[in-house]
Amino acid sequence: MSRHGFRSLRALAGAVAAFASLAATAACGGPSTEAPAEGTRAHPVTVSFWAWTKGSQQVADEFNRTHDTIKVKFEEIPSGGLGGYPKITNALKAGIAPDVLSIEYPSLAQFVSQGSLKDISAYMTPDVKKKFLPQTIELTTMGDKNWAVPSDAAPQIFYYRKDLFEKYGVEPPKTWADFRTAARQVRKAAPKARIATFFADDASFFQTMAWQAGAQWFSTEDGSWKVDTGDPATKKVSEYWQGMIKDGLVSTAPSYSPEWTSSLKAGTTLGYLGASWSAGTLAGIVPEQKGKWAAMPIPSWDAEHPSSGMSQGSTFAISKDSKKTKAAMEFILWMSTSPDSIKARVTASTSTAFPAARSLVPVARKAIDTSFYGGADLYGLYADSAATINPDWLWGPTAAANNTLHDQLQAVVSGEKSLTGAVATTQRATVDALRKSGLKVEDGS
């Protein structure tokens, strides 16, 4: 991570703290209210855990199998954007949230600013922190306090049907200019086929593309937020994808919809602009296409300087009302750093999450079955791509940008609005939302 990136994240800490004072007192349970760190074999401490990530049930089962005095009660919930976060928020308001929560990096600042999570700094010692990629530790540190433990990192990856690329004489694209050329070749060779999908139902898809291009929608200085969703990098990305959509070179099917999955099965969608975790998802959707897919770095704007954004990625946090912090942290740290945990996750499911704990990367590489991708070294690819993640992107402390952009993208694919217009509307809505929250905001547009 660049020095600028580290400075920005430290500045972010102050701005998030100003958003809601971090509710530090409310988020710290006193010693008298805490349950014992461990129970006994006869009466173990039970830690509740909510998540949607693949393999979580198997991870909880493995922990329970190998631990006698702490037990985990796991509940699978919908993914964050599909109902998981509202469920968590409602449970927090009602005081019935689980001890351990799975929260993606883009949403972490919102939960912290609402005072929904416990400060776990006492457990994140220097020896613990050095186990993780430094970028992920920075993303979970706000107000000089640690609020979550990194689970994975998620560099962008392009998956493609190598058999159909060869059939149609298409070269795997290294740059976005190459990608447009390849898209034209695909449509010319098979008029009903498209090279990939622009997921207009998922605002993070476009946000990550902007991140990769060098955009910086949020920045902070002296406790004030600057918002600029229309910076030059974002304009470049907007114009590019507007052209791809207008010219009919990509599909705009909703992510994971019957339309999208059926096009993968039929071979009319030849590629998937995803992330490290997407490999397992794809293999689960079209298992009959084993050996026909390949993976490569996401196309870059400059072939000499490859870059990546980070598509989601998860952390583990402890809810503010938990009375089992010590036991919950023992489970979280085991889940994030234990070879047994990653083995359980990747061998008992189709998960291809790239661990944030560096020591687990070779464990995951050995445990994962990559035969769907012809035995390729996926984790070597992920490690190389993770090294190119633009370090200067910050997520804001409000959902306004994501929610507004989500709504605006629907108008883009229907032809009612341009991407540039959608981003401009997102800018205004985000600035308004932050000002209404009482924050100092500079409109960078």
Image (spheres, rainbow, N blue to C red):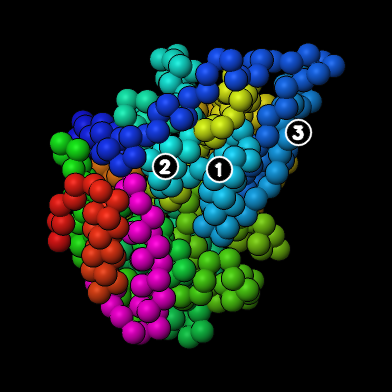
Vertical position of residue 136 compared to residue 295: above or below? above
Question: Are the residues tagged 1 and 3 within 8 Å (C-beta)?
Answer: no
- Amino acid, disc 3: Asp
- Identify the element where label 2 is drawn: loop
Which secondary structure type mostly characterizes the magenta part of the structure?
helix
- Identify the element where label 3 is drawn: helix
- Amino acid, disc 2: Gln
Does residue 254 appear anywhere in the picture? Answer: yes
Q: Which residues are magenta?
A: 395-420
Most foreground residue, 16 or 414: 16
Vertical position of residue 228 compared to residue 187: above or below? above
Which picture quadrant has residue 205?
Answer: bottom left
- Identify the element where label 1 is drawn: helix
Q: CA distance from mark 3 to mark 2?
A: 32 Å
- Residue at x-position 63% and y-position 40%: 96
Q: Does the segment drawn in magenta span residue 4? A: no
**Seen in the image, is 39 located left or right of residue 23?**
right
**Where's the C terminus, which quadrant?**
bottom left
Q: Position of residue 193 (x, y in %)?
A: 50, 79
Read off the residue under disc 2.
114
Q: Disc number at residue 61?
A: 3
Read off the residue under disc 1.
92
Question: Are the residues tagged 2 and 1 within 8 Å (C-beta)?
Answer: yes
Marks 1 and 3, the one that precedes in the sequence: 3
Q: Position of residue 236 (x, y in %)?
A: 22, 65
Label 2 environment density (alpha carbons within 10 Å; few <14, some 14–19, many ≥20): some
Q: CA distance from mark 2 to mark 1?
A: 10 Å
Vertical position of residue 271 compared to residue 94: above or below? below
